[in-house]
Image (spheres, rainbow, N blue to C red):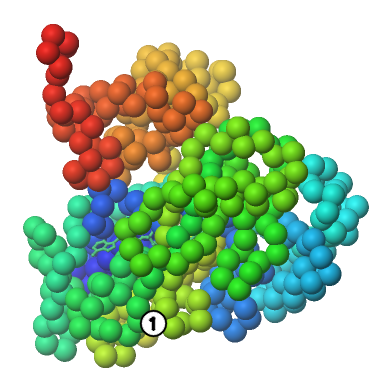
């Protein structure tokens, strides 16, 4: 199979690039090792679409993040993903913090981020009455949006697919050969792909993928973070951060697009790239951080904990690493995309498009490019009349499978039948929220598995939780059917 461009990695970076390149007359495929897109850092984050006041002026982050974040409201309309404007507060507790707030205000001005203001104690309390009395003031960035990063990645990829981009799931790239001056040959466990250009968006494994082509320009390491998901109960409206440290933005309280809240995130460097386990000390640190912002915070509202690793490019001053390899022409890195990787994603894609053009890729627009995507209907968000109409047309929309999040069978079937349809229990969860509620899938998981098996025409024992080897059912117990 011969391509113009192969993108390696289906996180928000790879899918944003696939979406951006889908408007050109290129034969493109995205190869992803997992069973779905958004299975690593892109599903393990706080989902704050940072507007760009944080990165140091002069860095690639500062150049790419603000324009990327500004594209989100338009993209949400075109691609049908959820977005919520919450704004961000960066809260100061001391004179030193107040100086940091001034510094961030300067960053915002230099980075071109508008709608940023400084609040005094009274203004802060008027906006968020439950905030700690120790808070002296804050930076308020009005333009911060919340998204679900995995929903955005799915939307990017589905639109790219509808415009002709291919996807290879379960395709872990294992070996890369450079053939002559121009072409690469990529080997996965069961396929071979030839291509003129490679875009390396493999997250924390970007250095391993580069090494397959003999490139040793940078090293990746994970900055591990714990997060907690809370029930829909906190009395806050704005994302709240403390003042940032050198490597982390600190522990924040985050209202999500779906009405839940998140406490995120701790930050410790880890050697094991696959370690996405939670640790108790990390969760204690999160609870302490939440109480500092909101003294009445009650940890009993935590319904789940999870963790992930930010893909950090070492020896690159904490910056994004996006460029064509000097030693291997045609090989383009989109690496080191740690926070603000979500807010920046559309900007990263735009930047990679330019790097690709400079590398000699001919970018001719497609005359019939369609920027729009039809999302699956969100039943829980509909009026009674809309629900009634849908149920009358198809009774499966009247059978509620996930009671916590009000997800009917019809919505799950629609998620399986989308262009990039759900194939696993977790895939259904990311597309419909079935299993994301207070009971954390205690009641609905087996019903979801049943629907998946029926729709995919496979026995229930073959339905996977997420990974290819994550079997849930092994067979029937004696005497039970
Ligand atoms: C705890 C935590 C909190 C965060 N909070 C925020 C936040 O609030 N706001 C924000 O902007 N950012 C946040 N981030 C950062 C954000 O999640 C990342 O910047 C972003 O998800 C990186 O996306 P990516 O596509 O580059 O990497 P990933 O999502 O990791 O995707 C890389 C993909 O490459 C695939 N891959 C790897 N090797 C191969 C191979 N050999 N062959 C094929 N495929 C391969 C992987 O399976 C994976 O799907 C947070 C991150 C963490 C961990």
User: In percent of the image, x 16 and y 89: which residue is there?
Assistant: 181
Q: What x and y, as percent, mark residue 116?
A: 76, 64
Q: Is residue 465 visible?
A: yes
**Residue pushed farthest front?**
281
User: In percent of the image, x 11 and y 83: which residue is there?
Assistant: 179
- Say which of 102 and 18 sits in front: 102
Circle 1 residue: 323
Corner quadrant of residue 89: bottom right
User: In percent of the image, x 74 and y 39: which residue is there?
Assistant: 296
Work out which quarter of the rendered image holds the C terminus and state it: top left
Per the image, label 1 sits on a secondary structure element best described as strand
Q: Quadrant of ligand 1?
A: bottom left
**Residue pushed farthest right?**
122
41 vs 78, left or right, is left
177 vs 49, left or right, is left
- Up the image or down, 339 lies above or below 102; here it is above
Work out which quarter of the rendered image holds the N terminus and state it: bottom left
User: In percent of the image, x 8 and y 58: which residue is there?
Assistant: 190
Q: What x and y, as percent, mark residue 305?
A: 48, 42
Corner quadrant of residue 223: bottom left
Q: Is mark 1 within 8 Å of ligand 1?
A: no
**Residue pushed farthest top?**
479
Within-10-Å neighbours for mark 1: few <14, some 14–19, many 20+: some
- Say which of 479 and 29 sits in front: 479
- Up the image or down, 235 lies above or below 12; here it is above
Corner quadrant of residue 99: bottom right
């Amino acid at each position: 199979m011969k391509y113009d461009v192969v993108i390696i990695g289906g996180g928000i970076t790879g899918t944003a690039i696939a979406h951006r390149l889908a408007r050109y007359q290129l034969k493109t495929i995205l190869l992803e090792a997992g069973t779905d897109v958004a299975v690593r850092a892109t599903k393990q984050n706080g989902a704050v679409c940072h507007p760009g006041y944080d990165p140091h002026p002069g860095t690639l982050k500062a150049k790419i993040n603000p324009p990327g974040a500004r594209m989100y409201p338009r993209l949400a309309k075109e691609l049908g993903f959820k977005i919520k404007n919450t704004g961000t507060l960066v809260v100061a507790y001391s004179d030193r913090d107040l100086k940091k707030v001034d510094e961030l205000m300067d960053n915002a001005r230099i980075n071109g981020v508008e709608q940023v203001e400084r609040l005094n104690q009274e203004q802060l309390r008027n906006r968020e009455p439950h905030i700690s009395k120790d808070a002296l003031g804050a930076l308020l960035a009005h333009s911060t949006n919340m998204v679900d990063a995995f929903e955005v990645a799915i939307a990017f990829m589905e639109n790219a697919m509808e415009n002709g981009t291919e996807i290879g799931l379960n395709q872990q790239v294992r070996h890369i050969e450079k053939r002559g001056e121009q072409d690469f040959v990529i080997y996965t466990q069961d396929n071979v792909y030839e291509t003129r250009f490679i875009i390396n968006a493999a997250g924390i494994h970007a250095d391993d993928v580069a090494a397959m082509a003999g490139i040793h320009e940078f090293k990746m390491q994970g900055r591990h973070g714990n997060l907690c998901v809370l029930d829909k109960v906190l009395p806050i409206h704005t994302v709240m951060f403390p003042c940032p440290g050198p490597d982390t933005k600190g522990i924040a309280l985050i209202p999500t697009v779906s009405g839940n809240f998140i406490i995120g995130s701790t930050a410790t460097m880890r050697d094991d790239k696959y370690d996405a386990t939670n640790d108790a000390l990390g969760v204690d640190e999160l609870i302490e951080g939440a109480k500092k912002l909101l003294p009445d915070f009650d940890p009993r509202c935590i319904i789940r904990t999870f963790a992930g690793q930010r893909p950090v490019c070492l020896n690159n001053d904490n910056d994004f690493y996006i460029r064509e390899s000097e030693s291997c022409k045609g090989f383009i890195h989109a690496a080191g995309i740690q926070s603000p990787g979500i807010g920046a994603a559309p900007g990263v894609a735009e930047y990679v498009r330019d790097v690709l053009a400079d590398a000699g890729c001919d970018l001719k627009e497609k005359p019939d490019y369609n920027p729009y995507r039809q999302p699956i209907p969100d039943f829980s968000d509909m009026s009674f009349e809309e629900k009634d109409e849908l149920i009358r047309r198809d009774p499966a929309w009247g059978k509620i499978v996930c009671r916590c999040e009000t997800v009917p069978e019809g919505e799950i079937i629609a998620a399986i039948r989308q262009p990039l349809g759900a194939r696993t229990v977790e895939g259904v969860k990311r597309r419909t929220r079935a299993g994301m509620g207070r009971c954390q899938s205690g009641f609905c998981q087996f019903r979801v598995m049943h629907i998946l098996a029926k729709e995919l025409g496979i026995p229930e024992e073959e339905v996977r939780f997420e990974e290819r080897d994550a079997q849930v059912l092994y067979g029937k117990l004696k005497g039970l059917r």
